[in-house]
Image (spheres, rainbow, N blue to C red):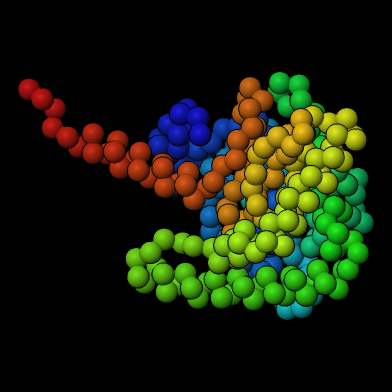
Amino acid sequence: MQRDALFDALRCERHDPSPHLRVRTVWISDLHLGTPGCQTGQLLDFLRAVECETLFLVGDIVDGWQLRRQWYWPQAHNDVVQKLLRKARKGTRVIFVPGNHDEFARRYVEHSFGGIEVVDDWMHETADGRRLWITHGDLFDGVIQCARWLAHVGDWAYETVLKLNRHVNSLRARMGLPYWSLSRYLKFKVKRAVSYVSDFESAVAAEARRRGAHGVVCGHIHHAELRDIDGILYANDGDWVESLTALVEHDDGRLEIVDWTRFEAQVRAEAAEAAEALAAPVPA
């Protein structure tokens, strides 16, 4: 994280309206509003803290699959929607690329709602001239395309693991242990899951090459990543259920994955050090 951004964060209290993090572009995806797993508290903190020219919502913002099974929409989820609309009103360009869980929004491509533009996909040019293709990524998921019923079964299983994860972490918190994601552990320990992630990344990168882009930004698999795949930049912005991550573009075009949990912890540590320094007696 750039030092200037950290210093901005250190200077701001929760009631201070000035931004903590100033960047050119932000990508977030897989918020899954409408599910208990959505980390709305941290998400709202991030949205309050960040200021950008363009904010991309890269799919699965609202979880229509879950809402059809059981309605769940607390006030905090309304607050997130209102915050996004407020950003659009105040001059941030907000572009929404629907995913599989909010595929109902694909009926409204090329429309704008409250200043939020709905598009099928997008080609973004970075400050240093690179062309990045923006897509949620579900169209490159063989399970969703070839066996939709299996995708719904997998979604139900995933929600079950997340519920178990909340119980596990409640116990860990009482024991003084840090947060640990059971679902992420399973995802990257099961051989078939690792192979699925690798195949997905390669397929999305290959399509970006076919479209003449220098890279691709996507979501869908809930795994933040920034790496080169055969000369194509592959960037996944992660999610706000497990990893609490976003992808940002700095003013010079440099891309970076922001791990919000670590960022907040670093800011708190820096603030504590600064407070200590201010409280220390001045040498005579």
**What's the residue at 65%, 39% (across, down)?**
226
Quadrant location, the C terminus = top left
Q: How many marks?
A: 0
Question: Farthest residue toward the bottom?
Answer: 70
Question: Farthest residue toward the left?
Answer: 284
Frontmost residue, 53 versus 221: 221
**What's the residue at 50%, 30% (across, down)?**
2
**What's the residue at 53%, 55% (across, down)?**
42
Residue 257 visible? The answer is yes
Image location of residue 157, percent across then percent down: 69, 74
Residue 105 visible? The answer is no
**What's the residue at 66%, 72% (across, down)?**
159
Image location of residue 133, percent across then percent down: 81, 37
Q: Image quarter for residue 132?
A: top right
Image location of residue 63, percent across then percent down: 74, 65
Frontmost residue, 55 versus 152: 152
Image location of residue 19, percent across then percent down: 52, 37
